[in-house]
Each structure stands twice: as structure tokens, then as C-alpha cells.
Amino acid sequence: MSRFGKLAWAASAFTLIVLVSIRYIIGGWVDLLAIPLFLLLLFSFVAVMIDIKFYANFLTLKTTKHGMNMGVSLLLAVVAAIAVNYFSVRYDYKLDWSQEKLNSLSPQTQKVLRGIDSEMKVFVFYEGIKFKPAKDSIVDLLRLYSQESSFIKVRSVDAYVDKILTQQYLSEIRNPANPLVLVEYKDKRIQVVQPYTEVQISSAIIRATRKATKKLYFVMGHGERATDGQEESSISDLVEGLKQTSIDVREINLLEGGGQVPEDADALAIVGPQRSFFPDEIQSILNYARSGGKIFIAADPGVGHTVPLITRVFGIEYKNNFILNDRINIAGRGAASSLGFEYGTENQITESFANQKDVSLFDLVSVVQKAMDAPKNLSFDELVFSPPSSYVVNDLKYANHPGDRGTFSMGIVVSGALTGEEKIVDGKKKYSDSNIGGEKAKRFSAVVFGDSDFLTNNVLLQGVNRDLAMNAFSYLLKEEDLISLRPRKPAGTQLVITSISHFFIVSIGVFIPLFFMILSLVLWFKRRGD
């Protein structure tokens, strides 16, 4: 090999080191890297052409030919290994054997992804090598989404490298997180809320795929729970969760604007009223229900509201009593706090809770149940039940005098059509055979809970309170794909080893290696003797 040939190879090696080093430092490819790549190819070509005769003679040697045969075999093995790795990455398929399916997407998310009918881009923006591990963990989670739907396209963007794309997507975002995840679908861009879990990513995808925004009105004017503010007694966290799923949350005073529920209302919510409703307000609510409206009611017992009058028309008896339990001690709470241990399995609101052994927490909750004189054309499903050791009292001054113990319904859902025009006259329910506006009654739905405390910021995240609330609103709004995604936790696995299993494990771990050790020694001594 000539001196100039060696210099050319040295130059190509140097440019290779420069290329790899710069690529590693900046963490991505930039157009300027084409310069050292071009020089690498140029110096390599020059080195070969300078000593072309040397390489030609070398290839004709007998030893070279034998070596090349071995080299070809090694090359084929390497190509086969590369092909196996390529196809394993290109067609990545995993089996999740965990009992809780911790390494796969929930059925709710899978249902959402099946509804995507065009390309959805998911961008993961990060800044340099420092945030690369965090980016990689997010991409690993997003890979489950792309495996489930071919329309999901995941792209990682280093903000230091691709400044044009970063400016295009992040210019209007104040104080962007690092990393930051954006979902782009058709003409919508949705920022994923931290932490980047399946719950948050799926919620962003749901918001991006929404064709229309559902409107939810919270009734105000009777001391209801505040929908804003950070007080523990407000329901601002619940409202924020509803907004994150593209639900338009508004407030309404039924005494204003003609005293009617707006025609664009997809659902009406009454949460924690402290004072009575006027007859006209009650009639507006009943008219809305009869026209096919969806109503959510969560009312506390022992206050002067008239919720029982409304629920009675729906065939639900709001007992306005107190469910107590002096046998289950809850830290920091007394007997007035009640746990939801059992859940109904006939309704999608609670069917996913039935076998999870999770609890919900209620404070000063009343019994809500199907009324004895409920219309036969209405269907009812009880949602959540108190423990069997519970008892009820009509007044808290009798809390230390427990009566009969048992399970009591704390939440119920009703659906059907109200057949006549129901009116409240002198505080009593009156029926009329006439139809409102001459129209046939439409099918309505209502979810009623005997407590509103479980929706407040103070206890919303306790147990499955948030899931229970979100599922109820999703059911009423007919947004089944918004049924709350529940974080899955690994459960302990009990391993029972019998005497036969123990012997089998010991045999594999001790006797089999010992057998091969003895066999190897015998073969070694035999070959040494020969």
C-alpha cells in the first residue's frame, strides 16, 4: 500500500470520527453533516483508486479466496441477523401476560383509536440529550398507540435541531413543558396535559377527534357548589376534568332568560343545592326531562332543598336521611362518612368497578332508591351501595342509636319517557294527561346521588370518586368513549409450590447443571487419555 493511500485512509477515518462525534453531540441530523459524509466517501474512493492494483492482486491470492468464503458466510449471517431485527421492529407485536394488562392499552382507549379515520400526528418536543430519557419513555408509551392504529404517527422533535418545526407548533404556547406532547388531527392541535400517562394522552386524542362540543349546564342560584376557585368545597377540579374532554361547561340560573333550559343543553347538572327551587324552576326541569333531557343530580341530605320533589317525578325516592357506619373507621372521619363497597353491574357507569375491589367515599349521604309507585315504563339501575354494616337515621341526633343494618343504595340511574305533563302544585306532585306542546314524550335519563361532597376538590381523587363522576356525565352526554380511564395497579401474585413442583425446580437448578459438569469432566479425561 502506497504512502498516499495510507494518508487517504487516515483522512477518511478522521472524517468518520468527526461525523459520528458531531451527530452524537447535537443528537440529530442536520444538513451540515453532509459535508463530512461527502469527504468520507471521497477519501475512501481516492484511497482505493490509488492502490487499485494492490487490492486486485490481493483478491486473487488463494488465501484471500478461502478467507472470502468465510467472510461471505459471516456476511450472510450478519445480513440474516439484521433482517430478523428489522422485521421484529417493523412488525412489532407483544403479548401482555400481566393479569392487570399493565403493558397494553385499556379497552376504552382501543375503542377511541378504532374511530380514527385519517392520519393523526403525535409530536414529542424535547430539548437536547438532557431530556432524551424522558422523551424515550413517552415514545415507548405512544408506540402502543401506533401499534393499535396505523393512523397514529409518532415523531420526536429536538427543539435545538429542528427550530423551524418547533417554532411552527410551539410559538403560541406559553412556558411549554419539556418534553411537550402535541396531538394534531385534521384541523385541531391539542396539547397533552402532564403527567404523560394513558389517561392524559387518550383524553387529548378524544378532544382532537370530537366533531361537536357537548354543552353541560350547571344550575346556580340555590347555594350550589362553586364551579371555580380552589376551595376544598368547590367542584372546580371536576369541571376542569370535564373541560379537558371537550365538554363546554356553563352555568345557568333558571329564573333568568325566560326560565327555560336552553335548547342547546346536552345535559343539566344540579350539584349541592342548599335552598328550595321555585315551582317555575322545578317545572322547567321537568319540561326539560320530558323533552328528552339528561339530568345529573347530587344533593346533600339535611338541607332545605326540594330535590325530592324532582326525583319523585322520575320514580326515584330521595329519602333525605343519613347513612352511617360505626364499624368501619376512616382516618380523620367519623361514622357519617360512608364507603361505596359494591357497584351495580348492569350499567356502564359502574360495570368496570364491580370486580376491582375499589371504594368510593361519601360524606353525609342519603339513600336514593326506586320509588314504590315509580312508573312502570321507566327502567332503574342502582349504581353504588354502602357496606352491609351500615344503618340509617332520619336525624343525626340519633346517630348513636343504630337501627337495622344492611346495604343501601347511594346512587341510581333512571331512563325512559315521562308519559304525562307533571306539575308541582302546593309542594305536591300532580299529573296531567296532556302533552307539552302536543308532542310525544321523548326518552330521558337521570343520574341521582344522595351526596355532593364526593365531587368536591377535597375528596374527588379519593378512591374511584372521580371515575364515578366522569362516567356518570359521559353516560348522560352519550360519550361512551369518555368513560373514565382507570389507572391500573399491579396486584400481588400468590405462588403456591407443591412438593412435586419444588422437586422439579431443584432438579432444574441443581441436578441438571451438575449432570453436565460431570459429563464434561468425563469427556475431558477421555480425550486427554486418547
Image: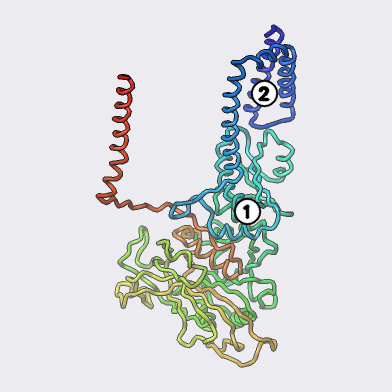
Helix, strand or loop for disc 1:
loop
Residue under the point 30% across and 52% down: 496
Task: Tell me residue 60's x, y (percent).
Answer: 66, 15
Q: How is the image coloured?
A: rainbow
Residue placed most toward the observer, 297 or 321: 297
The reply to whether discs 1 and 2 touch (Cβ–Cβ < 8 Å) is no
Q: Quadrant of residue 401?
A: bottom left
Q: In the rendered view, does 138 fall on the left or right side of 399?
A: right
Kindly identify which numbered label has been placed on residue 14: none
| Type of amino acid at the residue the image marks with label 2 | Leu
Task: Tell me residue 448's x, y (percent).
Answer: 51, 74
Quarter placement of the C terminus = top left
Residue of label 2: 19
Residue under the point 56% across and 35% down: 81
Q: Does residue 450 appear anywhere in the picture?
A: no
Q: Is residue 452 above or below residue 505?
A: below
